[in-house]
Every structure is written in C-alpha cells, then in structure tokens.
Image: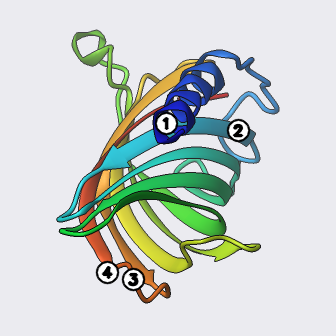
Amino acid sequence: MKKILLSIAFFCACFSIQAQKNVEVASSNKGKVFYETASAGGHYKNMSPLSLQWKLGYTFTNRFYATANLEYLLGRYKSSELKTYYDGANLGVGVGYNLVRTNNEWLDPCKNVDLRLGAGTTIGHTNWKYTFYEAGIMLDTGRKNSLILGAGYRYMDSHTETIDDYKGFYVSLGLRI
C-alpha cells in the first residue's frame, strides 16, 4: 500500500509540472500575476519528505513579489522500530526578491536568480502536524513558461510527538506560468 501511495505521489508530481500554460498579465514584471507548480524533496536523519507545491504570486515591483502557497507533503519516516509514511497539507506565504537579472546570451539557461523566504503551517486533520520556515535560491529561464530550479533550507517544527523536527536542505524543480 505504501509503495502505491508513493508511486501516485511521484506520478502527480510529474503531471503537475508538465500540464501548465502561461498567462501573461502585463508586459513588464510589475503588477504581474503568476502561477508556479513544483515538486521538492530532501532527506534529514530518519525523514524523507516529498512535496507538491502550488503557488499564486503577485509582483509588486520589477524585483519584489509575494506568494500564497498550498502544499501537499508525503514524508517517509524510518526509525529503529517504525517505518511508515506521514502526510499533510499546508498553507503558507512567501516573499521573493530578484537578486540577478541578465540578458547575456552566454547565461541563457539562467536569466533570473531569486532569493525566497517562506513560512506556513499544516491545515485540516493530518497525521503529521508542523510549522515550517524556509529560505532558498531559485534559478529560472525568464521566459513565458519558465523552468525553475531551486535549492534551499527548510526547518519544520513538528507538533506530532512521534516525529522529530526536520532540518534539511531541499532541491526543487518547477514551472512558472
């Protein structure tokens, strides 16, 4: 059963990354509404979380933006006497700042470098309750359907007694529309 759930999560991650279309709201980045979907994963001690993320954002200036985030997380927890899966949905908010923007053709694969900060908490009746804080660097191609590659650090303050706090690095792959 656990293998089936993990397979479904990976399938959904692949589907959500590829099935998107671009919606251009404004010619400049200022005042632009955007949508992102991504999948992220990491590992720390006995927890290996995999998440599917959906973000709706708005750019206030050409460099500063904010996002509202929805995420589904499936975590594989393994200890000496227990090996199981925990899941949870969370809502969060984030802010981002574009550190580098270039039009250099030599750097064509990477047009933008963004710094992002975010926080959120689980919602609903989940078997793993936590509050998270994260910081990351995201690279994107700067095109209409922009591929996003990111890496960062996430701290998850677990409110479930049987699960330790998660402190670890993650890698993210997504698409901005």
Chain-order first, disc 1 or disc 4: 1
Q: CA distance from mark 2 to mark 4?
A: 32 Å
- Does the CB distance between marks 2 and 4 fall below 8 Å? no
The residue that appears at 39% across and 82% down in the rendered structure is: 162
Could you classify mark 4 by the number of other residues whose Cα lies within 10 Å: few (under 14), some (14-19), or many (20 or more)?
some
Chain-order first, disc 2 or disc 1: 1
Q: Amino acid at mark 1?
A: Leu
Q: Nearer the viewer, mark 2 or mark 4?
A: 4
Residue that numbered label 1 is attached to: 6
Query: x and y percent of residue 153 in the render?
Result: 28, 62
Query: x and y percent of residue 86 in the render?
Result: 50, 61
Image position of 161 with respect to 90: above or below: below
Residue 162 image label: 3
Q: Amino acid at mark 3?
A: Thr
**Can you name the residue that lies furthest to the front here?**
81
Residues 108 and 165: in front is 165
Q: Quadrant of the C terminus?
A: top right
Residue 35 image label: 2
Label 4 element class: loop
Chain-order first, disc 1 or disc 3: 1
Label 3 element class: loop
Residue that numbered label 4 is attached to: 164
